[in-house]
Image: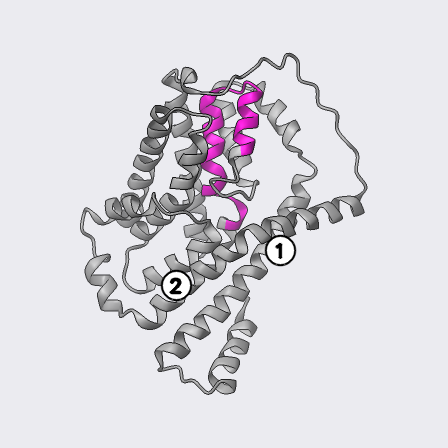
Amino acid sequence: MFDWLDQASAWFVFDTLGTTDESHFGVALHFFIYDTIKILLLLLNIIYIVTLLRSYFPVEKARVYISGKHKVIGHVLAAVFGVITPFCSCSAIPLFLGFLQARIPLGVTFSYLISAPLSDAVVIALLLSLFGWKIALLYVGIGLLIAIFAGLIIGEMNLEKEVLIEVKPLGDVEYKEQKLLFKHRLKEAWKYTVDIFKKIYLYVFIGVGIGAFIHGYVPAEFISKYAGGNAWYTPLVAVVMGIPMYSNAAGILPLIDVLTDKGMLLGTALSFMMAVVALSLPEALILKRVLSWKLIGIFFSVVGFGILLTGYLFNAIL
């Protein structure tokens, strides 16, 4: 799909700049240019298409629909809805608060908050391009299960009193669908795409930059020795290292690609990615304004345990 880009970047780095494919700098620069342009192109196209499709299923309509469903069905719908909203862990919080204000059950709102950064359309597309459809489907399926079961567990713990904001009854919520012309939907989708793109492109440069440095300069033996292998503790170390960090899938997946090439097991690498995108210190600090530390701690613990099990599962079956 991107063979033309690989050839163009190789021509620029090796022929035009005069570097060689045996030099650390040349290999790192080629990787950086190729992966950066590829991911930015994917982001623009995927976010635009998903946003255009989402304009036919507005947030308010989805919120009203979910609020009237059975508890388990609500968790499933909230998790699936998270897949079609291209938000990072922090960007998903406003809609999470909207769910709370709509008096949707607490556990259901957490199913959305977990699913949105973990298994959105951008993640799916990048996983397809890097690891193929089998890994992408398995990852998304497990991501949805984590979101659903974590939400169910939190919902059964009766933690509503740990919500620090006042949730007022909204009564019968009415939704009035606004009919928009197709050209208006195209315009609004592009506006939203540009807005999201501006918020995440820097993470792409940072993530790809780190990946390029590792790809070009860090020996495979180094990563294999300290982070590779099938030691029982490697997924645990990956999750603990990932939680304090903050990025989105577009920024972290290029690094995951390099780490696996350098010898890290795929399950360990993906558990690290899940921890980075689904749980983060900035997310905890933002949530502290509306949730108690107790609820935040339970949220992080339940999701972190699910991610850890995912790492072990991937390592066992792949």
- Dot 2 surroundings within 10 Å: few (below 14), some, or many (20 or more)? many
Q: Badge 1 is on which residue?
A: 45
- Dot 1 surroundings within 10 Å: few (below 14), some, or many (20 or more)? some
Q: Which marked residue is nearer to the observer: mark 1 or mark 2?
A: 2
Q: Badge 2 is on which residue?
A: 211
Q: Main secondary structure of the magenta part?
A: helix
Q: Estimate the x, y position of residue 177 in percent, counting from the top left.
A: 75, 28
Magenta-tinted stretch: 94-122
Left or right: 290 in relation to 318: right
* Near-viewer residue (72 or 173): 173
Q: Estimate the x, y position of residue 69 in percent, counting from the top left.
A: 56, 19
The quadrant in which residue 107 appears is: top left
The colour scheme of the drawn protein is: one colour
The correct choice, above or below, for 11 with respect to 300 in the image is below
Q: Estimate the x, y position of residue 280 in percent, counting from the top left.
A: 39, 41
Q: Estimate the x, y position of residue 139 in percent, counting from the top left.
A: 41, 46
